[in-house]
Image: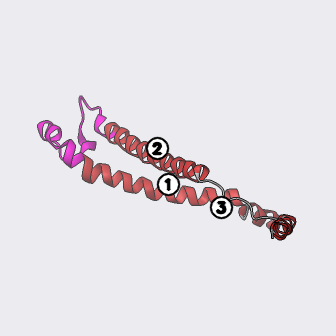
Amino acid sequence: MLKEFKAFIMRGNVVDLAVAVIIGAAFGAIVSSLVADVITPLLLKPVMESLGVDKLADVSWNGVLYGKFLASVINFIVVALCIFLMIKGLKSLEKKKEEAPAAPPAPTKDQILLEEIRDLLKK
């Protein structure tokens, strides 16, 4: 059973998934910081000042904390935009690889011999 577990863990898909989850968690922290520390103060500061709050998460109306919801929506939009741009960049790289003309194959030994014979016959 231990060998089966080890084989399962070492499969490529499981390792790739683990790496993706770890990177995704780190990326989520970066996006949350971007929204909380950059976007909110720069873009939403006038609105927040008029509402009399310091943090977007504190924005509420009749006890409904819609500020947290807005922060989550902004996080989602930033993550979706980043993923979209990454996928678009990868697709453009793939297109460039496909568009690059393939080098002609090297001549075979038979072709080389035939060319030598042709050149000798010309002389």
The mark that comes first in sequence, 3 or 1, is 3
Compared across the picture, whether 45 is left or right of 122 comes to left
Residue 121 is drawn in which quadrant? bottom right
Label 2 neighbour load within 10 Å: few <14, some 14-19, many 20+ = few
Q: Which residues are magenta?
A: 40-68
Image quadrant occupied by the C terminus? bottom right
Q: Which residue is mark 2?
A: 84
Q: CA distance from mark 2 to mark 3?
A: 24 Å
Q: Is residue 1 above or below residue 99?
A: below
Q: Amino acid at mark 2?
A: Phe
Give residue 78's position: percent from left, percent from top. Answer: 38, 45
Give residue 95's position: percent from left, percent from top: 56, 48
Q: Is 78 left or right of 63, judged from the image as shown?
A: right
The structure residue drawn at horizontal position 14% and vertical position 40%, both measured from the top left corner, is 46
Q: Is residue 57 magenta?
A: yes
Q: Secondary structure at mark 1?
A: helix
Q: Amino acid at mark 3?
A: Val
Q: Which residue is mark 3?
A: 15
Residue 65 in sight: no
Graded by Cα atoms within 10 Å as few (under 14), some (14 to 19) or many (20 or more), the crowding at tag 3 reads few
